[in-house]
Amino acid sequence: MAEAFLCDAIRTPIGRLNGSLASIRADDLAAIPIRALMNRNLGVDWGAVDDTMLGCANQAGEDNRNVARMAVLLSGLPETVSGSTINRLCGSGLDAIGSAARAIRSGDAQFIIAGGVESMTRAPYVMGKAHTPFDRAQALEDTTLGWRFVNPAMRTAYGVDTMPQTGENVADRWKVSREDQDRFGLASQQKAAAAQANGRLAVEIVPVAVPQRKGAPLVFAADEHPRATSLEALARLKPVVREDGTVTAGNASGLNDGAAATLIASEAAAVRHGLTPRARIVAMAATGVAPSIMGVGPVEAARKLLKLGGITTDQLDVIELNEAFASQAIATLRDLDIDPFDDPRVNRNGGAIALGHPLGMSGARITMSAVEELHRIGGHYAMAFMCIGVGQGIGLLLAAT
């Protein structure tokens, strides 16, 4: 089979909920990193792109009707380029990259744009249709995050715990203390702050020109979710699920906006278009767990992935784990015998607690971050993996070229 390579990647800065990207539609947002890739790879024949795969978890508002295809058309790519939107909730962007690699390895494609987008700010309220004639009991559902239009059979069989509740469930079962969660959250913020200060994160980012009512557009060029804090400040935050709980706004990821895109190509396509392969996509793996403990989904996904790659965790040089909650990140890493606090391979530049978690984009973000780190440290293997709502985990194994 042909090998699949990640040749280039770029993303927007990540915006806070109702923050700098609040006025940008999801389809326009998705087009921005694609256009950036086009602008910096002028030797590419863009009409030769076989497909565009973008992850997106919501798809209930302006990201409806196949946001990947909309992004293709809005970006300036030829209209002959197709687009497909992938929804594996939080793992959508990573799934898009892995699916692109599978298509190339199988020979069905040679050159694919893959990534993800989410505007959680612009996620709409939705209303279902009446169940019976003259029914006046319709309710509005918020599509920003979590369950809506719940199937009663699902509630009975598995429960419909909120995402923070699943974080508490993991903390209880895996005995992850509030102190450790706050310590992990602080480390994420500190690493992200350092990466912003030294310019490491800037290499991933294309600035976004945000139109203003008057005057020139505002140039948004840096992730705005990170916050300066301390263990003392984090300890003062109230739990969000129950009074005696441990999950807080300080040790959990945020609701955010952002988009990312990568170029995935076969070796032949890379040569043809003048691209330089940066990492070989070795394998992708996914697995399921009980929805109530969705945060530990990455554990079995990682084990499955490492078995496919024929390596162990000791051979990994870079580990990028999306931080939905500190509780699940700590539990996941401990189950894999990886130190969540002192292992320098883990989330060198912070994770979703500091940087934010635009659902459909995050998998693409941690993938590009893993590749960049491999080249910076001269490493060989990297793993990007994450938990997924409704009880799944997904991972991608990468090898530097």
Image (cartoon, grey):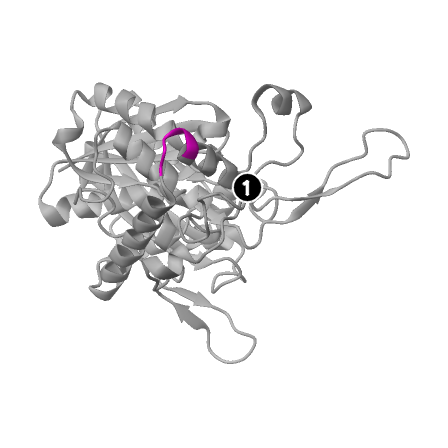
Is the residue 206 above or below the residue 69 in the image? below
Which residue: 43% across, 36% down?
92
Part of the protein shown in magenta: 172-176
Position of residue 116 in the picture relative to residue 142 (left or right): left
Mark 1 — residue? 58
Instruction: Give the image location of residue 359, x and y in percent.
Output: 45, 43
Is the residue 37 above or below the residue 164 in the image? below
Q: Which residue ends up furthest to the front in the rendered image?
A: 244
Q: Which residue ends up furthest to the bottom in the rendered image?
A: 215
Asked which secondary structure carries label 1, the reply is loop
Which residue: 27% across, 58% down?
190
Magenta portion: prevailing SS class: loop
Which residue: 30% across, 21% down?
106
Instruction: Give the image location of residue 95, x and y in percent.
Output: 38, 32
* Residue 174 painted magenta: yes
Q: Amino acid at mark 1?
A: Asn
Residue 234: quadrant of the picture: bottom left
Q: Nearer the viewer, residue 215 or 365?
A: 365
Instruction: Give the image location of residue 186, x and y in percent.
Output: 31, 54
